[in-house]
Image: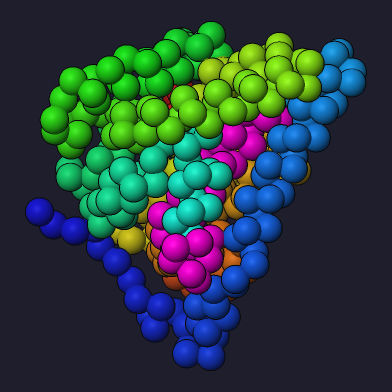
Amino acid sequence: MPAAPRIRPSDLFTPDDWAPFQTRSPWMGPLLVLHCWAVIALAVAAGLIWPVLIPLSVAVVGTRQLGLAILMHEAAHGGLSPNRRLNDLLGHWLCAVPVGASLTAYRPYHLAHHKYAQQAEDPDLILSAPFPVTRASLRRKILRDLTGQTFFKQRVLFAFQAFASRRDEDLAEGAVVTGRSVASFLLVNAVLLAMAMLAGVWWAYFALWLLPLATWFPMVTRLRNIAEHACVEGSASDPWRAARTTRASWWERAFIAPYWVNFHAEHHLFMHVPCWQLPQLHRAVRSRPQGERMEVAPGYLAVLREASAKA
């Protein structure tokens, strides 16, 4: 099985230039996890105090639920803490489990994606290969997300399949990520429900946590997947084009792409650079002639137009 083509840091940077990108902070990762939960708490509080803001709160919470998944991804690369035990504790229990994932299951799956990016053996190829699709097809996919159908498939049907199967590698991504963590997912969500009941706002769990998890979170996860790899010409053979970076405005960072997840081309070039250093890495790479070969989209709407351009 051929691995994806790669470049080395020394192909672009001197040792002094590269040194800042090798730094692992002991506090940035935990602060990002704290920030994510703080934003969720503030959005829930806003919905409780001003019910008219509940639709906005659902979008904010759903995006930060994606943020938890992104920080789980960071933990899969050892980026939340230089201390491996703390890294995995934060990444699993505070990031993965609350949204129905498992860091233990996700890490080997995701590292295989990096090793075989856009090759036939890439386990994520199914997420980008169908594109471009028609606008009607994309609308149907987004409608399934926003009506909870995707959530039901990934968090209910896939979970039952995972329990019934002894070979997780035969299952789709949703089962690999969720099937091994059903009990812990239910436990954490039971705690969240109990906290809401003790606070006298039992309905807040359903309206301001479960509803975003079942609707907005699947949709923005889909948009993230499309933007990262779909419709990038030469992605299977050129390491500079293995993924796409998408320029994100403030509202896209708030409602679609938190925690620098939009810098995906840079992440695939140098996957061990922590997420908070990706903007700096982007500027450094783009300042070199080779960086002009990267796929950089002006925004998520532009990506969606390209991904739904099939006649």
Q: State the residue at coordinates (13%, 30%).
A: 166
Membership of 65 in magenta stretch: yes
Magenta region: 59-86
Q: How is the image coloured?
A: rainbow
Q: How many marks?
A: 0
Residue 181 percent across, percent down from the top left: 37, 33
Residue 156 appears anywhere in the view: yes
Residue 192 percent across, percent down from the top left: 62, 27
**243 relative to 7, above or below:** above
Residue 191, image quadrant: top right
Membership of 40 in magenta stretch: no
Prevailing SS of the magenta stretch? helix
Q: State the residue at coordinates (41%, 50%).
A: 243
Q: Toward the viewer: 178 or 308?
A: 178
**209 relative to 256, above or below:** above
Q: Toward the viewer: 163 or 246?
A: 163
**Side (left or right) of 8 relative to 82:** left
